[in-house]
Amino acid sequence: MSETTSTVARRRINLNGLLIEGRALIALVLIIIIFASLSPNYLGIDNLIIMTRHVAMNAILAIGMLMVILNGGIDLSVGSTVGLTGVVAGSLLEGLQIPFLDVFAYPAVWVVIVISLAVGMGIGYINGILIARLKVAPFIATLGMLYIARGIALLITNGTPFSRLRGEEALGNTGFLPFLKSSPLGLPMAVWVMVAFAIAFAIVLTKTPFGRWLYATGSNERAAELSGVPVKKVQTRIYLLAGLCAGAVGLLLTADLSSATPSGGEFFELNAIAAVVIGGAALSGGRGTIRGTLIGAFVIGFLVDGLVIVGVSQFWQQIIKGAVIIIAVALDQFQQTLQKRRAVKRVSADGKTSEPSRTAQSAPGEEKPLVDNSVDK
Amino acid sequence: MMTDFGTPTTDTDTDTDTDTDIVLRAVDITKRYGATEALKGVNFEVRRGKVTVLFGENGAGKSTLMKILAGVETPSSGHLELDGRVISVASPNEAVDLGISIIHQELNLCANLSVRDNIFIGRELRTAWGSIDYAAERRVVLGLMERLEEKIDPNTLVADLRLGQQQIIEIARALAADARILIMDEPTSALSATEVEVLFKVITDLTDNGVAIVYISHHLEEAIEVSDYAVVFRDGELVAKEAAANIDLPWVVGKMVGHAAEYDFRDEERNYGDVALSVKDVRIVDTSGAGRLSVNGVSFDVREGEIVCLYGLMGAGRTELVEAIAGREPIASGSVMLGSTDLKPLSIEQRIARGIGLVPEDRQRDGLVQLMSVGENMSLASLTSAVKSFFLSRGTEDGKIADQVRDVRVKTAGARAPITSLSGGNQQKVVIGKMLMTGPRVLLLDEPTRGIDVGAKGEIFSLLFREAKKGLAVLYVTSEIGEALTASHRILVMSKGRVVREFDPSISTREEVMAASGESEIGTSPIGATQ
């Protein structure tokens, strides 16, 4: 993951950054140690690859979700978008009947992939327009889209999954499964896609004005707007990117299952949100990194798979997963309160120390975490 | 003329009046925000059944002291004594329990709730069953409304009330809490003349019943009229205390302003260029509803190299005007031209690209991105200029930031220090530097020196005058008369949504300008001129 170490991330390596990201990392190490001691197979190369493949899809969704959460938004529709794009890919591979003609079109595999991703981005774009232009609350807009996208997927399939995804030699569309199920250099395609997305999005976040604008709008939208940041454009684009991520996962999931079901991707959005939050991002926006999010996805994936391997009952799995999410965020809050208190103490001890100065009215809408307060100097 | 209340002094030891009158005493209160001292060892007392009026310019420390008394803020050092007993007020609720209520300058009402619910919020009356006793609450509210001579039904939604009426509800809420000490921070700013009269009657009524009142107002004459004791603040220090019998307007103004400002930027040579900003007959609808116009037909020009000051009282429409010019609020009618460009159809980012930007009034809420560093804040408005083939060039950006940090003289541990580590003055320099980095033709600033210390104020103005010499047109809003007179080429006075008069600061007096704004009627009063 060192490829994603970015300038922004590097700058945040002060005490605070280390603690936030370190906490998720410590959790990951603990999970690995515990399950490795319980099950000798846990750390086997084969198992690690399988687990990473499971992590990959959630991680890709979480990267898209991070974009949205950095803006202070949320996208509940990504799970449904996964299902819809999978179904779109499946229907294209089975052959698309041209209306009024007794003709079936069989697009080439790359066309299928492009169209499916476009559908994902289209859903995200509609979310973005609803939220940025029509001022619908992100929670509501994407909740509505969650139902709409799922409904469309059910309409397309009439409720039954597509399972003839192999294509036919004669039609030249057999490449879908071989391509997405391949394992270049021994790693599954999903893992490669995750790495590619992580690098690309880390670059967007740290090396482009767009990334800086995203952090700025998430922290203080009013100030960003007055600084000439195109806040609406930023908001629309992040939902589009979240849709792109969902589209990619839809394709990978379809290939993984060798069938496209309309119920594919259900509840995926919740795992993605969990990964982002465990990775140290603030739901109020402005704080979070790709690296943290990846670690968060690994924590969840390795935990769930470990519980399965050591034979913990399904019911207990749910409870443990829930507890880990809550503990992670509670620790984050606790640590911030602690820092605030320390800052206050420092001030009362010595008025000249640098510390947050604020007017009585704090910025609207959030309890501000005093991030980066612990400049060590 | 001086009575036994002693000469004006900051030293409490010389107070000769009896301690029994004193309900609340603030001892050696100091409050720091970052490196700025908002209050410097203030000693202050509030007397039973009397009105103590606090005078001082913006940022002098009055509001900070009131917030400490009301439990909104805690002092960095020093303590409060209630009836001679040391108390600590950690929250507004604790203050209310101790009998200290505050009517804030900004309204703190829930617009979606009724008048009755607002008045009893957090202190609802209960029936024996524990549910809210609406009937009892209604009776109390009706009684309060009668006392305040307002015919407002207790079930009216606060959102449906005029601003002035909302202010009345704030006052009613404080009265309902049976306060022994009532703090009023600019209670009349939204009231009509008749409403002010009623308020003064209520104040007399309260003091007759032994309630101690602390009163803050920028309307000096009105405040002098209501006062029993006057206290004057300047730059975080209590500079004078006096009984009302011994004060008059010139005394108050003199103490408020102190010796002349340490900076004076009036220069003789003025070579202005072309008209950079032209505002014609602009009208802006008040966004708080009521179909009122906050700006009602304003026209003026600002030329290149000229620094124009927009002086006036709070609520005169100054903030609305500059925000509309910057593109944040829509203009109902009229035109705003930047050179030959019509600004009306342009977005904020397009206006910044054309060369006009705003340094907003509320630094924390609108000016800074708190989670970002000094440098990231500085470059936020001009990021695209640091892009090399799609990507931000860290080197280019850092170079530009370093230049600008030097140029506007930000005192910081480095461009990567968190923005929250800076003092108010330095934070403001970052916000100004951010707009200057976009290479503007016109810079708008709303209360650029609010809440920052004198030294930083001088630095900010010398920065503006330096940029003006290079051709920048500056339009800034201020409520400080000293600033308007010493740091501008031209003063436009706004009152009730209009530009009522224009002054040349080199030949105008403090009194003329203040009178034009409606702040004081000193020109027509028998007291005469100061200094």
Image (tube, coloured by chain):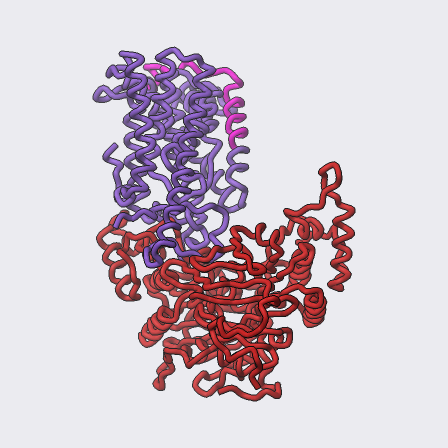
Chain colours: A purple, B red
A76 horizontally vs A34: left or right: right
Q: Nearer the viewer, residue B292 or B199?
A: B199
Say whether residue A147 is magenta.
Answer: yes
A161 horizontally vs A305: left or right: right
Query: In the image, residue B398 lies at what x, y percent?
Result: 25, 55
Q: Tell me where residue A172 sits by quadrant.
A: top left
Say whether residue A319 is magenta.
Answer: no
Q: Nearer the viewer, residue A169 or B449?
A: B449
Q: Is residue A238 above or below residue A328?
A: below
Tally the marks: 0
Q: Which span is picked out in magenta?
A: A145-173
Can residue B397 be seen?
A: yes
Query: In the image, residue A318 lies at what x, y percent?
Result: 45, 20
Q: Looking at the image, which residue is at 27% across and 48% down?
A: A376
Q: Looking at the image, which residue is at 60% across and 77% down?
A: B244
B126 horizontally vs B382: left or right: right
Query: In the image, residue B452 lies at what x, y percent?
Result: 41, 66
Query: In the image, residue B290 lies at what x, y percent?
Result: 66, 60
